[in-house]
């Protein structure tokens, strides 16, 4: 993230900062386009049906809670 300029040394990476950034990316995500891009690499693309913004938001809430 530092190499691309998306994160500076002044910022402290903690769970809350990470979740904030991930939520921002998920909010901007075109889920249908992402599903189409990935489907050719997945043996059974029917599993991608569950992909949605809500699905990804639920997943990221589990980060650092295990």
Image (cartoon, rainbow, N blue to C red):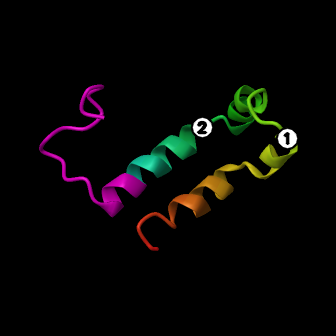
User: Residue 7 lies in magenta, yes or no?
Assistant: yes
Residue 29: mark = 2
Q: Main secondary structure of the magenta part?
A: loop
Q: Is residue 59 left or right of residue 32?
A: left
User: Residue 49 lies in magenta, yes or no?
Assistant: no
Under tag 2, what secondary structure?
A: loop
In the image, 54 versus 9, the foreground residue is: 9
Q: Give percent across and percent down for residue 54.
A: 66, 57
Q: Residue at horizontal 52%, vertical 59%?
A: 60
Crowding near the residue tagged with mark 1, few <14, some 14–19, many ≥20 C-alpha atoms within 10 Å: few
Q: Residue at horizontal 69%, vertical 38%?
A: 31
Rendered view: 42 above or below 55: above
Q: Is residue 3 left or right of residue 24?
A: left
Residue 63: mark = none
Q: Residue at horizontal 51%, vertical 65%?
A: 61
Q: Earlier in the sequence, mark 1 or mark 2?
A: 2
Q: Give percent across and percent down for residue 7.
A: 25, 38
Rendered view: 53 above or below 64: above
Check the picture and name the quadrant holding the N terminus.
top left
Q: Is residue 47 left or right of residue 8?
A: right
Q: Residue 65's image quarter?
A: bottom left
Q: Give percent across and percent down for residue 3.
A: 26, 26
Q: Give percent across and percent down for residue 26.
A: 55, 45
Q: Is residue 10 left or right of residue 19?
A: left
Crowding near the residue tagged with mark 2, few <14, some 14–19, many ≥20 C-alpha atoms within 10 Å: few
Q: Which residue is mark 1?
A: 44
Under tag 1, what secondary structure?
A: loop
Mark 1–mark 2 distance (CA, rounded to whole Å)? 22 Å
Segment colored magenta: 1-19
Rendered view: 7 above or below 22: above
């Amino acid at each position: 993230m530092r190499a691309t300029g998306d994160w500076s040394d002044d910022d402290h990476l903690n769970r809350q900062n990470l979740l904030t950034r991930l939520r921002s990316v998920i909010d901007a995500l075109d889920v249908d386009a992402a599903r189409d891009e990935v489907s050719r690499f997945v043996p059974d693309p029917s599993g991608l049906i569950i992909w949605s913004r809500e699905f990804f938001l639920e997943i990221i809430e589990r980060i650092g809670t295990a």
